[in-house]
Image: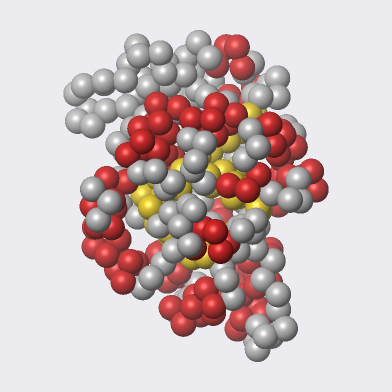
Amino acid sequence: MKKILLMILSCAAASLFSFVAEAQDTESIRKGEFSIQLGGHRSGRLEYPENTVAAIEAFSKAWPTALVEVDVQTTADGRVILLHDLNVDGVTNGTGVAMMMNFETLRTLDAGWHFTHDKKSYPYRDQGIVIPTLQEALAAAPNHPFLIEMKDGKGLGRATAKAIRELGAENRCYVASVNPVILAEFKETAPEIATCYDVLDAAEALTALREGAWESYRPKHEMLVLSSALREEMELSWEELRCFQRRGVLLCFFTVNRKEEMEYLLAHEVDCILTDYPSRLAALLGYD
């Protein structure tokens, strides 16, 4: 148990995470209501300006019902916005820590400022692209499932739950956080919405699997998400991962950008792949 827990905690510290999401209706996803095999990491961040409505609209138009992955945090005045980094410097023409800024100030920034395909041209600058709210993101792709990673900010768990409910998106969201406190806050607020394992719950599942208690262990959630590097570091065999799948747990890998790795994972029948290059994966899946 101690060895497994230490491995998971060290991976989390390196911003690698594994978690399981509890779906409201897994069978509807498997049967095609949603097609989560293609997942856009940060809404396809190397093809579109990440975590923006422009990206989500383009992604959802190209691949109806595919999975949109986004990151959220709260502003100083409690609004839930899409942003991966704690500061705005990397994606906007502004500077500062988002959770210390008011929403009105953040909306004046150009969220397409740094996006480029060739480091020479910046096609999304001055196009009115702003940091969106979670409600705006969900409304931009109303027929798509979302994987929402909660980053940081006061009251983020409660605020995220409220935003999802406002859009009536409870049955199409998977919500994750590597912060157990934020995740517990969300779960307490909205137990009906799919949630994701924190590192402690993941340790419990792996301990049950590896110490002969799997038959009596009841999986708490329904989607396991990990990277290839994390799978290797934790020495997770494909047979162990099949154990999760046989119990109805969906298997998802992040962040997969090389064609060879995509092909390898598809050959192993994973349920979802998160990528910065959705067009590349779509071509392999025959979507184009």
Say whether residue 75 is left or right of residue 136. right
Q: Quadrant of residue 166?
A: top right
Q: Residue at x 70, y 75 (%)?
A: 218
Q: Residue 144, percent across and down?
A: 49, 43
Q: Residue 29, percent across and down?
A: 51, 58
Q: Is residue 201 above or below residue 73?
A: below
Say whether residue 197 is left or right of residue 65. right
Residue 92 visible in the displayed image? no
Q: Which quadrant, please, contains the N terminus? A: bottom right
Residue 133 visible in the displayed image? yes
Q: Residue at x 59, y 46 (%)?
A: 173
Q: Quadrant of residue 165?
A: top right
Say whether residue 37 is left or right of residue 177. left
Q: Residue at x 26, y 21 (%)?
A: 122
Q: Residue 267, percent across and down?
A: 31, 71
Q: Residue 55, percent across and down?
A: 39, 31
Q: Is residue 15 above or below residue 268?
A: above
Q: Residue furthest right?
A: 188
